[in-house]
Amino acid sequence: MDQIIIRGGNRLSGRVPISGAKNAALTLLPCALLSDQPLTLRNLPRLADVEGFGHLLNELGVSTKLERGRAEEPGRVITLNAADIASTVAPYEMVRKMRASIVVLGPLLARAGEATVSLPGGCAIGNRPIDFHLKALEALGATIELAAGYVKATAPKGGLVGGRVVLPFPSVGATENALMAAALAKGESVIENAAREPEIIDLCHCLIAMGSMIDGIGSDRIAIQGRSALNGAEYRVMPDRIEAGSYACAAAITGGELTLVGARAADLHAVIESFAEAGVAITETNEGLDVKANGKLRPLTISTAPYPAFPTDMQAQFMAMLCLADGASVLTETIFENRYMHVPELGRMGADIQVRGRTAVVRGVDRLVGAEVMATDLRASMSLVLAGLAAEGETRVHRVYHLDRGYERLEEKLSAVGADIERRSEG
């Protein structure tokens, strides 16, 4: 098992290339199941979750071919071919490692008429039921059975039919499953209270490239006309807004200045507004985003909520940054009830954080001190790296396999802009 060692105190300066979005890639990959023609995705990040999803698709009979990207587009290129569906079962040993695997349910059901998918795993950050996914598919005519830790979905004879899906909460995963299933349903489907995240918009544009007709993209009401078949396509994965926000925090916590190459301001409105309140200047350029920390950080009051509000996936990184702010910040986590597991680890580094229920009060301290810390989930891992970048002395982050699920070439990117960081095998 690897660990990351950081000797903090260096001011970061330079250019950081932003990779393709993990959360978008994990939604675009299963689109291959909707067509018997090849789907090519460009700007694919090299991440453990993406690798794992590729293996799951292979299990279902999808062939995959990986290539290096073009010189001007460094991300990898994958071509997926689902001409023949060899299996409609997504097994436990593959799905348990990654919650995003549940999004094979909708496209597999729509294409093959049935799908059996293990109940998912992923980060232990709280209860994330899949009821909304199942209700959405039932609205399109599916019959759902739960047995022995698996979901079995069956389409009516003749296939799924268009329907009205009303989500009680704008669940990203449920919206994705409903969209992909509706793409091959007969007639029009309408998704009410749909998630509006940029990754949902990316999925809609990929489906359109494959021949879908979709209205209401970017709104909470999406209408999709089902087709009897979709064609192949070539599509570029959007840049990772969470990676971009994380590196912006790295600039802020070290008093640095970074250019986030390829990042888009349109995907980060609430995050950029919070940076501005904290005294961090972010400017959009032709290359991406320029981030510059201007003196002592100001405290913030932040509440996570579905897009376009402040994203839960940026809460841990902002918490680390605000550990050095001039005053007390208040963070409220409304999405996941167990997303403060990084707090005790930051406390080992000298942070002053008190948690009461879903609210954390972060009182800024004069300095953080390096320590041995344990990563508990993907975004918590990044918060510990950020704290280590600013801490005095050496920080060792253990269980960094969480980081490998969502940050491509982390040590390489940080080293290139002045961080003293390395990966070392434990033992």
Image: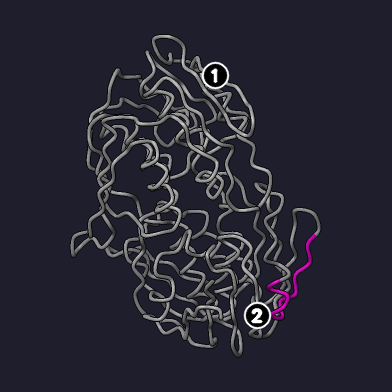
Above or below, 376 against 305 in this view is below
Q: Residue at the spot x=26%, y=38% of the render?
A: 81
Q: Which residue is mark 2?
A: 372
Q: Three-letter amino acid code at disc 2?
A: Glu
In terms of sequence position, does the residue under pointer 1 or pointer 2 come before the other? 1
Tell whether position 374 is magenta.
no
Which mark is drawn over residue 245?
none
Which mark is drawn over residue 138?
1
Above or below, 50 against 133 in this view is below
Neighbourhood count class around disc 2 (C-alpha, 10 Å): few under 14, some 14–19, many 20 upward = some
The image shows residue 36 at horizontal and vertical percentages of: 26, 29
Q: Residue furthest top?
A: 157
Q: Three-letter amino acid code at disc 1?
A: Glu
Q: Residue furthest bottom?
A: 393
Q: Are circles 1 and 2 on residues that touch, CB within 8 Å?
A: no
Tell whether position 348 is magenta.
yes
Q: Residue at the spot x=67%, y=77% of the render?
A: 326
Magenta span covers which residues?
345-355
Number of marks present in the image shown: 2
Q: CA distance from mark 1 to mark 2?
A: 48 Å
In this rendered view, identify the residue nearer to me: 273 or 68. 68
The image shows residue 6 at horizontal and vertical percentages of: 53, 83
- Image quadrant where residue 170 sits: top right
In this rendered view, identify the residue nearer to me: 1 or 249. 1
Q: Residue furthest right?
A: 356
The image shows residue 342 at horizontal and vertical percentages of: 67, 66
Q: Is residue 313 left or right of residue 338?
A: left
Q: Is residue 280 left or right of residue 301?
A: left
The image shows residue 337 at horizontal and vertical percentages of: 71, 49
- Image quadrant where residue 73 sits: bottom left
For the rendered model, the colour scheme is one colour
